[in-house]
Amino acid sequence: MNLTGTISPYIGNLSFLILLDLRNNQLNGHLFQEIGNLYRLKLVILQGNQFQGSIPPTLSNCHQLQVISLANNQFDNVIPKELGYLPNLRTLYLSGNNLIGPLPSTLVNISKTLQYLSLGSMGLTSFPPILFNMSSLLSLILTQNSIPGEIPKDFCKYFPRLQLLDIAFNQLSGELPSEISHCQELVELYLPYNNLHGSIPQELGTMSKLEVIYLGNNSFNGGLPPALSNVSTLKKVWFGTNNLQGSIPVEYGLLSNLVEFNMEGNNLIGVIPPSMFNISTLQIFSVAFNAISGELPPFKLPSLERLYLNTNQVSGNIPESISNSTNIFLIDLGFNMLFGSVPRSVGKLRLLQFFHVDNNMLTGERDGEELVFIDALTNCRSLVRLVLLSNPLNGFLPYSIGNFSNSLQSFLADDCNIQGSIPPGIGSLEKLNYLSLSNNNITRTIPWKVGGMKSLQRLYLDKNRIEGSIPNDLCQLQNLGEISLQSNNLSGPIPTCMYNITRLQRLDLSSNMLTSSIPETLWSLNNLIAMNLSANSISGELPVNIKSLASLENIDLSRNMIIGDIPSVFGEFRNLNSINLSHNLLQGSIPESLGGLLTLEAMDLSHNELSGNIPTSLESITSLSYLNLSYNKLSGQIPFRGPFAKFKAWSFVGNEDLCEQQQASFMGFKSCESITNKNNNNVKNILL
């Protein structure tokens, strides 16, 4: 309902009110004492708001109360002892507040009637002793506290009816006692994010009513207990991020009601039991980040929605039968040893949103031909992310790539030996925000239709063999934040219209054959963080009247043919970390203003025609760790304070008229004092 504001104290006048349910709104303020006037009230459900202050003790006047749910608010102070005087209270949910102090001893009065108790995020540092008197509890939630130590071996003796136990996000240690299996009524067991270790007890296989068991993010070791297969009621098993070893027991294929199976981040080996791919109820299967090997079993998983097999050692082909999992929306097979072609049958997965097969050995059906599986994937009208990078696909992008649904947002195919040109149809992908085709063998020009990708934020076409000019149509992509076109055969000028890409943060056009001067409009990109135009044939002067780029951190214009002076405005790029203007034809002096770059770490002005003194203002840049002024025409004294104390001779070599202070002599340059004396003698001789 999205209600806001406070609850009026006049609520106490609603004497016939039985149910007060305002959960999940944005109500705030205090809960007034007048709520205690609602003598007929049975349920108070105010969870998920922003109430503050103390829980009103007057709630104890509502003797018919059965449910108090105040979770996820901002109540503080102690839990009122008066709550222990509610004879009919069955449910007490107080998790997610700022309550302090121990549980009131008066709760023992309702220990035989209370069934649902939630005390998460209360700063508890031990199991409250009063809990062990609450034998009627069906649900106990103690998540996100700081309870240390071991789980008592006789824990279940005190909770014979317990159906749900949640002690996640605590500091439990030691082994999981086998006696936990004595909680025979337990349906859900949550113990993740603790410090439990040792093996997972085989006795869990005797818990005939268990449906959910989460033991992830602990330090369990040993193998998976085969006896768990005896619990036919199991629906969700999460043992991820432990140190479990061995293989997945074949018996787990008997878990006919299994919905979620998560073993990611362990040290499991062996093959996936084919019987597990016959479980018709399975929706989530994750064994990512293990050492699973062998081939993928045939898919007989009609309910499967998410498949995580990434970062293993799975080999063989992707089975055609993957198309049997018609409900799947996420497939991650990245970082394995799969080979062969991606089956065309993936095109039948109409609900597929995420398809990751990166870092394998997958190929096209035939080398040097169209990648037909990409054509098949255009039938997946919900596809959001397609990741193919680091596979030897050895083929061409199909013209039909433009038929991808507008749902496609990311297409990554770096390092795939993709050949041929970029199909013009790619411009039809209006929702695409991430396109990466780096390190391939793409040729010809960038199609002008790229201007149709209006949502594009990151464009990576570097390390290819693309030729021709940078199309002006690129300037229509006003959401672009990163452009990487380096290491191609691009020629011609940098488009002057690039100033339209106002969100651009990173621009890399290095190692091409670009000519002409840097457009003055390029210096108006206020959000630019990094600019690399190095290793081109750019000429002309750097504009003097450019305004300060406050966000610029890295600039590399090296290995070009830029002439003229270094603009003093560069000293106003206050966030600059590195500047490289080396291997150009720059003249004049080094601007004193560069001494104001107090965050600068690296500066390379070598191999130019710079003259004059090295500004002593550079001594103020304490962060400067790399400096190269070699092979210029600099003269005068080398500064020796601040960062200059650690620079070596190579930073200044090739400047014949430089000298150093005698007391700071360390690089082998001429002494400035001897030059001064020589000059004085020359003056005397002239006078004589």
Image: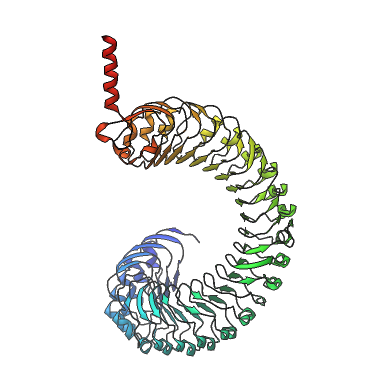
**Visible in this render: residue 504?**
no
Q: Residue at x 62, y 39 (%)?
A: 475
Could you tell me residue 189's position as x and y percent? 45, 80
Does residue 497 appear to the left or right of 645 in the view shown? right
Could you tell me residue 557's position as x and y percent? 51, 36
**Visible in this render: residue 423?**
yes
Could you tell me residue 132's position as x and y percent? 32, 84
Foreground residue, 675 or 460?
675
Could you tell me residue 495's position as x and y percent? 61, 34
Question: Which image quarter holds the C terminus?
Answer: top left
Does residue 222 appear to the left or right of 472 in the view shown? left
Label tally: 0
Examine the rendered structure and indicate whether residue 591 appears above or below residue 385: above
Q: Farthest left residue?
A: 663
Foreground residue, 465 or 423?
465
Does residue 477 appear to the left or right of 530 in the view shown? right
Does residue 379 appear to the left or right of 532 in the view shown? right
Q: Which color scheme did the rendering employ for the protein?
A: rainbow
Q: Farthest top residue?
A: 688
Foreground residue, 402 or 162?
402
